[in-house]
Image (spheres, rainbow, N blue to C red):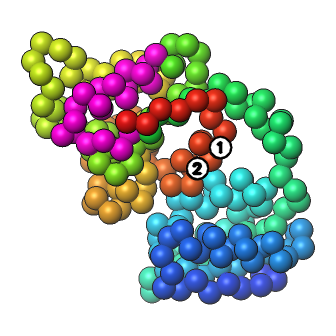
Amino acid sequence: MSVPQADRTLDCSGLKYPVPILQAEQTLAELFPGQVLEVVSTDANTIPDLETWAQRIAADLLLVSPSADGQFRFYVRKGRAPAAAGARASADNNLFLVVLRTGLNAPGQVRAAFMYASLAAAMGQDTVVYCVQEGADAAKRDVAEKDVSPQGGPTISQRIAEALDMGVRIEVCTQTASVRNIKAEDLIPQAKLIGGASLIDYAMRTRGSLTF
């Protein structure tokens, strides 16, 4: 794909996530619809959030260039006003969010998070368990080895399996994974790495939420 012609360039080199996105949005507000902003960044943690962010502000993410010398560029075209909030809410009225930030040292909390997620899915809700901070460890392949749940009761792995059977989506914050040195291959196959902006998007759209 050819590199878009930019109407303005914003240099965010050296700035940490999420500052490049915040400054990009401020700069886009100064442009006319249809104009293109080029953003230079050095923090790869910004990349997973770009698509969700662009959708949220009704802009078009045109290109994310490959990283070279620790630098990458993204190009976004300013759109027109976002769709009416009422129309968006109508489309999202069955989204249910469970935020898991508790680690394996509190197995009861982790099991409860997936249990309630299963219940929400059973009640017809499009349910997401979004794992941040220590909660990201619950989505790893080695959870069974580190689970200290009391014998005779359900394990974390069993609760996760129940949730997956009910269609619950398990997502892990990309930025959390980077800080905790968790790679995609460390996660169970059903878990997905996704940017932190998605959590904000879910929180804005959700019908209900629980935090563990």
Q: Which residue lies under the disc numbered 1?
A: 204
Q: Compared to 209, does 14 lie above or below?
A: below
In which quadrant is the C terminus drawn? top left
Residue displayed at 54% across by 68% down: 18
The x, y position of residue 73, in whole percent, is 60, 77
Whether residues under marks 1 and 2 lie with C-beta atoms below 8 angstroms apart, the answer is yes
Residue bearing mark 2: 200
What quarter of the picture does the N terminus occupy?
bottom right
Q: Which residues are magenta?
A: 100-119
> Is residue 102 magenta-colored?
yes
Observer-nearest of 79 and 150: 150
65 or 169: nearer the eye? 169
The main secondary structure of the magenta stretch is: helix
Q: Secondary structure at mark 2?
A: helix
- Quarter where residue 113 is shown: top left
Q: Residue at x 12, y 22 (%)?
A: 150
**Residue 171 - label:** none
The number of numbered discs placed on residues in the rendered structure image is 2
Residue 108 visible in the shown view: yes
Residue 65: say if magenta: no
Residue 26 in the image: state x and y as whole percent.
73, 74
Name which residue type carries label 1.
Answer: Met
Give percent across and percent down for residue 77.
79, 68
Whether residue 191 is visible: no
Q: Amino acid at mark 2?
A: Ile
Locate residue 86 relative to residue 203 in the image: left or right. Answer: right
Left-right relation of 28 to 178: right
43 left or right of 92?
Answer: left
| Rendered position, 116 above or below 180 | above
SS at mark 1 in the image? helix
